[in-house]
Image (tube, grey):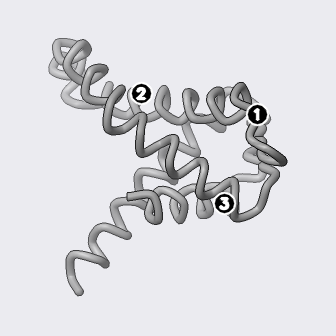
Amino acid sequence: GILMNGLALYAATKLLSGLQYTGGLKFFVIGGIVIGVLNTFVKPLMKLLSFPIVLLTAGVFSFFINVIIFWLMVKIVNIVSFSDVSVKISDFWIYFAAAFVFAVTNWILHLLIRNK
């Protein structure tokens, strides 16, 4: 949940110099919550609406849904203006790299937790 999302965000910030944040631990908690809410309510709707495209692209379009979720998280964190918390993306491609790092990290964390 929130902890795994926060850890995946942490990994993305450490691996990608184009992903910068302020707020320390508070950023990871808020970002983890925002991504959790987006994954619970927005992502299923996006998957449903894009099902034909996902089918035509053999699932590749699912990755773009993750990019959009990450983009929405950045927008929400910055628009809501949480005290001392912000996130900055240097360019368009960082969204793709961040979504990839986030997905791989979450996958690894889920594997580790399931195996314990």
Packing grade of label 3 (10 A; few <14, some 14-19, many >=20) is: few
Q: Which quadrant of the rendered structure holds the N terminus?
A: bottom left
- Where does residue 95 sit, x and y in percent of width and height? 60, 35
At numbered mark 2, what does the secondary structure look like: helix, strand or loop? Answer: helix
Report which residue position mark 1 lands on: 81
Packing grade of label 2 (10 A; few <14, some 14-19, many >=20) is: some
In this view, the residue in front, 109 or 63, is: 109
- Where does residue 108 sit, x and y in percent of width and height? 36, 68
**Is 116 positioned to the left or the right of 74 in the image?**
left
Report which residue position mark 2 lands on: 64
- Where does residue 36 sit, x and y in percent of width and height? 42, 45
> Residue at horizontal 74%, vertical 36%?
89
> Residue at horizontal 41%, vertical 39%?
37
> Residue at horizontal 15%, vertical 21%?
55
The residue under label 1 is which amino acid type? Answer: Ser
The residue under label 3 is which amino acid type? Answer: Leu
Give the spatial CA distance, label 3 vs label 2.
20 Å
Give the spatial CA distance, label 3 vs label 1.
25 Å
In this view, the residue in front, 31 or 103, is: 31
At numbered mark 3, what does the secondary structure look like: helix, strand or loop? Answer: helix
* Nearest to N terminus: mark 3 or mark 2: 3
Report which residue position mark 3 lands on: 15
Which residue sits furthest front? 83
Pointer 1 with pointer 2, Cβ within 8 A: no
